[in-house]
Image (cartoon, coloured by chain):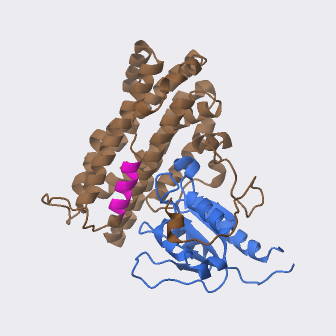
Chain colours: A brown, B blue
Amino acid sequence: MTTATSRLTRVHAINWNRLEDDKDLEVWNRLTSNFWLPEKVPLSNDIPSWNTLSEPERRLTIRVFTGLTLLDTIQSSVGAPTLMPDAMTPHEEAVYANIAFMEAVHARSYSSIFSTLCTTREVDDAFRWSEENPALQTKAELILERYRADDPLMRKVASVFLESFLFYSGFYLPMYWSSHAKLTNTADLIRLIIRDEAVHGYYIGYKFQQALAEASPERREAVKAYAYDLLLALYDNEVAYTESLYDEVGLAEDVKAFLHYNANKALMNLGFEGLFPAELCDVDPTILAALSPGADENHDFFSGSGSSYVIGRTVATEDEDWAF
Amino acid sequence: MAAVSTSPPELIYFSTRSGNTHRFIQKLDLPARRLPLEREAPALEATGPFVLVTPTYGGGEARGAVPAPVIRFLNDAGNRALLVGVIAAGNTNFGAAYGLAGRIIAEKCGVPLLYRFELLGTDEDVTRVRKGVREFWTRPS
């Protein structure tokens, strides 16, 4: 088994003015400027909306958020800390420390939603459900196995799949509610989480690609094959998880399109091509619009099908024009 | 009015070390040049009409969305005069800021935002952009 021989063997005081990889600072700045806490979102405004949901819809929502809480907990307490000893630069370690803390904020946020909207009993029931749901436990185990194994590249693969793929069976639901003008403040909070996860998946995927480029061609092929195998194992399990949750409300097929779309993006974060063809990634446009509120114009100028495209007046530009 | 030229405009693009936009350009297989990453590198100059392809930076705010090397390139009036359109890379996870760099450049430079794609781009993105760039160029205006 190949291990990173150039791992950091002792601790040096970190000097952010001497970078080995400027991506570390770029991502650190991005993450710290994105920092937020759940208290910033007025979740209590969702109480009237919560009361319009049926009992099965409320149960589904609490279960989905409990499943997301488990993933955030894994990423905060195991995933990001597991990546630290593999870091190639002290700045990379610091970025993982930021990711670990932010995942703890995400996990904590779901409890803020629960304490605002739900009864203690409903929440206790959902946490009990999370301990017993086979697909949720399998999902956690498939990831934790890779975190425990001595293969730094596969730890990053598992981490990117968690960040960029596994969350989305859950993220679908608040976007669905938001597209029906329900739980819109909760959706605002989830969008902050979605934004963070994009940076996490991008960065860990970038570090994976850097490390993979150093490996032998045989090792590169083997890791790529492992990665696709793991994705398929996770995908089969996600389908079971999705059906166990969403069949009751008739949304499972739509969630699966969202899974395919995001599985492709997770693979792209690793530098690999997507697996699912476009016809399987046909996500309901109202879900995409909920993901990008205010950005509903179609910018495919080429196809002529766009509702609008942006064009402005030509103006002279100087450096300071761009500094806004 | 008739077509100006039979060959499509050149693509000029920026891609960071992560190489996502670079990978997309490679898949397009169209004439393309990459803006240098380093400030010290000799500046690239546009020599004919071109479409700019750029990633979007930052966490969803206008400030910092356009990468600095792209700003330096567009601050040259000669380059700006030859810009005919912009294509932006991004991630829908950033919500309304998806491909924001493209919108900013389109507004500032008075050119259309032609297309947006995510990360490395899908096969469909490649097909649409390849076809679109050719047709855009030969379209009667």
> What is the quadrant of residue A122 in the picture?
top left
User: Magenta span: helix, strand or loop, mainly?
Assistant: helix
Compared to residue A149, the image places residue A247 above or below, namely above
- Highlighted range, magenta: A23-33
> What is the quadrant of residue A104 in the picture?
top left
Report whether residue A240 is seen.
no
Residue A279's x, y, as percent?
66, 51
Q: Name the one closer to the observer, A118 or A134.
A: A118
Left/right placement of residue A191 relative to residue A131 reads: right
Report whether residue A99 is seen.
yes
Q: Name the one closer to the observer, A243 or A203.
A: A203
Q: Name the one closer to the observer, A184 or A213.
A: A184
Left/right placement of residue A138 relative to residue A92 reads: right
Compared to residue A24, the image places residue A307 above or below, namely above
At 60% from the left and 65% from the top, the residue drawn is: B105
Residue B12's x, y, as percent?
58, 76
Residue A40's x, y, as percent?
43, 33
Q: Name the one closer to the observer, A131 or B61.
A: B61
Residue A95's x, y, as percent?
30, 53
Is residue A52 magenta-colored?
A: no
At 39% from the left and 66% from the top, the residue drawn is: A221
At 45% from the left and 29% from the top, the residue drawn is: A65
Quadrant showing the N terminus of chain A: bottom left
